[in-house]
Image: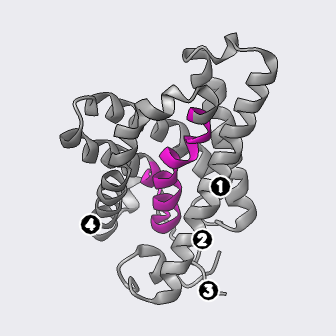
């Protein structure tokens, strides 16, 4: 089964970025941001359903980072992609600035995990599962304290941890599945940087 190949580029960091990669990352970030705009307006509704539902949606907000990192395979892709996701939301909501800051914080969190788990080269199914699970768990450990999750009963805390971890795992796996499906069609051949690299993940 064809999938996005792994990067074998010798250059690391932003110095290894081409104008093409930057433009494609910008396009993917803006498109993902536009697609998530409805979730901004639905946030208040989901908030009324309780914290468990909100944490179960974590994977949706990290999906662009997983997808862009998987397609671009450059250091900084997840962070830049999420920054552009936040920028894309600015014109559509009065709280766009808050969502931009939130997107940047998510990018700062997930970028080191992408580097640690994949080295920007190996994006197999197992690594994507690990990337998603660690992202969901670390996000909860850091931001759960700020959001008061630690004050919940232990049973609720465990359910929230499971929801956040599972949600991000699904998001990471779905990102790979979607990117691989796009690769199989050949529609974006020569456009997404991953298609120009010979070694498979």
User: Which is more N-terminal, label 1 or label 3?
Assistant: 3
User: Which is more N-terminal, label 2 or label 4?
Assistant: 4
Say which residue appears at 50% left-offset and 82% top-offset.
183
User: Which is more N-terminal, label 1 or label 4?
Assistant: 4
Where disc 2 sits, the SS reads helix
User: Which is more N-terminal, label 3 or label 2?
Assistant: 3
* Disc 3 crowd, CA 10 A, few/some/many (<14, 14-19, 20+): few
For the residues marked 3 and 1, what is the alpha-carbon distance in whole angstroms?
A: 20 Å
* Disc 4 crowd, CA 10 A, few/some/many (<14, 14-19, 20+): few
Q: Position of residue 30 (x, y in %)?
A: 29, 56
- The answer to whether mark 3 and mark 4 are in CB contact below 8 A is no
Please tell me whether residue 73 belongs to the stretch shown in magenta.
yes
Where disc 4 sits, the SS reads helix
Residue nearest the observer in this picture, 158 or 182: 158
Q: Which region of the structure is painted magenta?
A: 54-78
The image quadrant of residue 93 is top left
The residue that mark 2 highlights is 177
The residue that mark 3 highlights is 2
* Disc 1 crowd, CA 10 A, few/some/many (<14, 14-19, 20+): some
């Amino acid at each position: 089964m064809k999938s996005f190949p792994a990067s074998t580029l010798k250059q690391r960091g932003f110095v290894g970025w081409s104008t093409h990669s930057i433009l494609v990352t910008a396009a993917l970030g803006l498109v993902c941001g536009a697609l998530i705009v409805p979730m901004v307006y639905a946030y208040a509704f989901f908030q009324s359903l309780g914290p468990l539902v909100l944490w179960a949606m974590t994977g949706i907000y990290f999906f662009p980072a997983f997808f862009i990192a998987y397609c671009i395979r450059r250091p900084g892709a997840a962070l830049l992609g999420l920054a552009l996701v936040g920028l894309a939301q600015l014109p559509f909501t009065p709280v766009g600035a808050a969502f931009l800051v939130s997107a940047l914080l998510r990018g700062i969190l997930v970028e080191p995990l992408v580097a640690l788990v994949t080295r920007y080269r190996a994006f197999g199914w197992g690594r994507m599962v690990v990337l998603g699970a660690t992202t969901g768990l670390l996000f909860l450990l850091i931001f759960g304290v700020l959001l008061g999750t630690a004050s919940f009963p232990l049973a609720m805390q465990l359910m929230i941890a499971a929801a956040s971890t599972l949600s991000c795992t699904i998001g990471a796996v779905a990102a790979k599945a979607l990117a691989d499906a796009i690769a199989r069609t050949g529609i974006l051949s020569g456009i997404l940087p991953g298609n120009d690299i010979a070694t498979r993940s």
